[in-house]
Image (cartoon, rainbow, N blue to C red):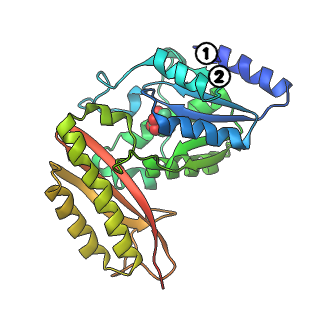
Amino acid sequence: MVVARTRAEALDWRRQMRAQGKRIAFAPTMGALHAGHVSLIKLGLEKTDVAASSIFVNPTQFAAHEDLSTYPRSEANDLAKLAEAGCSFCYCPLPTEMYPPGDSTRVMVKDLSHILEGEVRPHFFEGVASVVSRLFLHVGPDVAVFGEKDYQQLLVIRRMVQDLGFGIEILGGPTLREADGLAMSSRNAYLTAEERARSAGLARVMRETAALLEGGAGIRAATDAAKAEILAAGFTSVDYVEARRADTLAPFGLECAPVGASGRLLVAARMGKTRLIDNVGFVRRG
Ligand code: PAF
């Protein structure tokens, strides 16, 4: 696997791939890789000839009070996992390759960036869109894969690619879960053993609530009950539990989702000092 640290090295690799007529799939990451990331590489490889990834803990998507300095870093381990998954190239850029001295350009997907996660983390999606657009320019993929675990991020990237005409196909990879249902996440490493055991309650409540919404339960009543159950499961606080339209994340604006509508139930909750997010899809039955 080729490891590039500079934009020039990334462009060089991409030129070689193009010269060989190879289509590139790309799954960007911030490292601390788990099976969920590996599944994104494999999904990309089903569609293309070669897989590329990146490891860059992007400072612009962290607020000053967030975990940038303590975010788990394990590059050697991560590179071994990527190579094992069949990845041919990993871009681990120096910070100055992504944000050159004097840098002052940002990308903002307006509407989607200010709701749900964007309300709690106002800087977050601007940081994500800014770094992902640069990664796309440096790596030049044909297909890019993002986990559905970060569902709102996936929609933000889709919108950005459409608006800026990147010409990259965006694929969503299904969320991988631990045996007890907890969605895989690099941040799960922050949980103590006791918190880890209690965290399984989140996926259970989400599953049960999605089933109620599919059956026609009222949205406000179902999400309020879910919030109470998440707290009863031992979570410290709940930032939001919302059932939204799956394609735009707009509210349904009705008592219950219309028959046949595709929705997404999204949650963010804190277990001690760790903030966990999750989401599940649902379709309202007739
Ligand atoms: O999902 C992530 O790991 C990050 O937000 C991403 C897409 C790699 C951008 O830094």
Q: Which residue is drawn at 62% across and 33% down?
A: 136
Q: Which residue is drawn at 57% across and 47% down?
A: 160
- Where disc 2 sits, the SS reads strand
Label placed on residue 226: none
Label 2 environment density (alpha carbons within 10 Å; few <14, some 14–19, many ≥20): many
Question: Does the image show residue 163?
Answer: yes
Nearer to the camera, 18 or 136: 18
CA separation in Å, label 2 and label 1: 6 Å
The type of residue carrying mark 2 is Phe
Does the CB distance between marks 2 and 1 fall below 8 Å?
A: yes
Q: Is residue 106 visible?
A: no
Name the side, left or right, on which 46 lies relative to 110.
Answer: right
Residue 89 badge: 2
Q: Residues within 10 Å of mark 1 (few under 14, many from 20)?
A: some
Q: What element carries label 1?
A: strand
Which callout, 2 or 1, points at the residue further toward the start of the chain? 1
- Which corner quadrant holds the N terminus? top right
Q: Mark 1 points at which residue?
A: 3
Counting from the top left corner in percent of width and height, residue 15 is at 78, 22
Left-right relation of 193 to 161: left
Q: Position of residue 199 (x, y in %)?
A: 25, 47
Tell me where residue 227 appears, x and y as whole percent: 21, 62
Q: Ligand 1 near label 1 (Cβ, under 8 Å)?
A: no
Disc 2 C-beta below 8 A from ligand 1? no
Can you name the residue that lies furthest to the bottom here? 286
> Compared with residue 254, is residue 101 higher up or lower down, i.e. above or below?
above
66 shown above or below 7: below
Q: Which amino acid does label 1 sit on?
A: Val
